[in-house]
Image (spheres, rainbow, N blue to C red):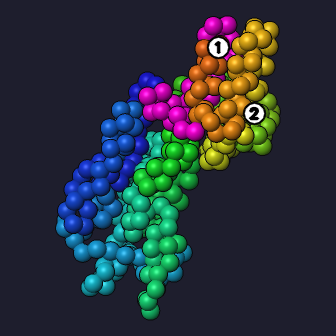
Amino acid sequence: MGEKLKMGISACLLGENVRYNGGHCRDPFLTDTLGVYVEWVPVCPEVECGLGVPRETLRLVGEPSNPRLVTTKTAIDHTDQMHSWAGGKLKQLEKETLCGFVFKSKSPSSGMTRVKVYHPNGGSVNQGTGIFAKAFIHHFPRIPVEEEGRLFDPGLRENFIERIFTVKRWRESMEAGMGIGRLVDFHTRNKLLIFAHSEKHYRAMGRLVAQGKEGGLAEVYDRYEALLMDALSLKSTVRKNANVLLHVMGYFKKQLSSDEKTELIELLESYRSGSIPLIVPVTLINHYVRKYDQPYLKTQTYLNPHPLALQLRNHA
């Protein structure tokens, strides 16, 4: 996979003792497993904006769409302090070329979804977003984001990690030089990956690439990036993957024996029914790609979108 990709993360998830109580929330998957492939850029909004360790707990108060950040017991409002710091921090993070960010769930500063927001007169709703997380998402709308709690879901974990590795490949392609030829090459290599997420986006991106010479290069690249990020934000499904794998079978119609075709079809049906994980038919197809030296499929990132050691396609 080449150089490590760079990602932002809530510092407590790396084991840094920056929590309100002086502790941390180290996540072994992020530090020990994904961390093999990632250079983490830790951020703790509460400490970095000037609050100490340990410190009084904070909570969001007011309307979920625009809450205030207030201490729990003394009711000191730190909203403006947080916004002021966040503005400068986001400018710094622009220089990091992040491929993604993992936020701490439920945090009033860093929670991405369903953060508790209290009404001044009592009661609460789980409809908020942490002050810094909201600012980050607004400032970097095309950078994939998740929170560690949601990454326990195998499907969400696979989708997020697939996105960050795609961002890395996209950035590397642009750094090598922008040109219609390079864009065609990137799109060709990622066709099946995109198709597995959204046929609608796949067709729109194909038209954009085909008509690329008719527009300004910077505009074409910007539109393509927007479509790419939007497509990959849509989760792949068993049905979508099965359709892609059936399409892939067509590349071997002259090579596979009747027994090989039967075996692959049986595996696809087992995958459809939920009896086996995606990695099983994909492994067999990768075997056929090597055995029959299929040139087009050898370039398809769909068959190897992220390091095999992460075992992201091993869930049924």
The residue indicated by pointer 1 is 289
Q: Amino acid at mark 1?
A: Val
At a point 24% along the width and 75% down the height, the residue shown is 56
At a point 78% along the width and 43% down the height, the residue shown is 200
| Residue 243, disc | 2
The crowd level at tag 1 (other Cα within 10 Å; few <14, some 14-19, many 20+) is some
Q: Report which quarter residue 70 is drawn in.
A: bottom left
Q: Is residue 250 magenta?
A: no
Look at the picture and state if 178 lies above or below 293. below
At a point 26% along the width and 62% down the height, the residue shown is 19
Residue 13 at what x, y percent from top left?
Answer: 32, 51
Camera-side residue of 140 and 20: 20
Look at the picture and state if 206 lies above or below 71. above
Residue 247 at what x, y percent from top left?
Answer: 77, 26
Magenta residues? 290-316
Q: CA distance from mark 1 to mark 2?
A: 18 Å
For the residue labelled by badge 2, is the local secondary structure a helix, a strand or a loop? helix
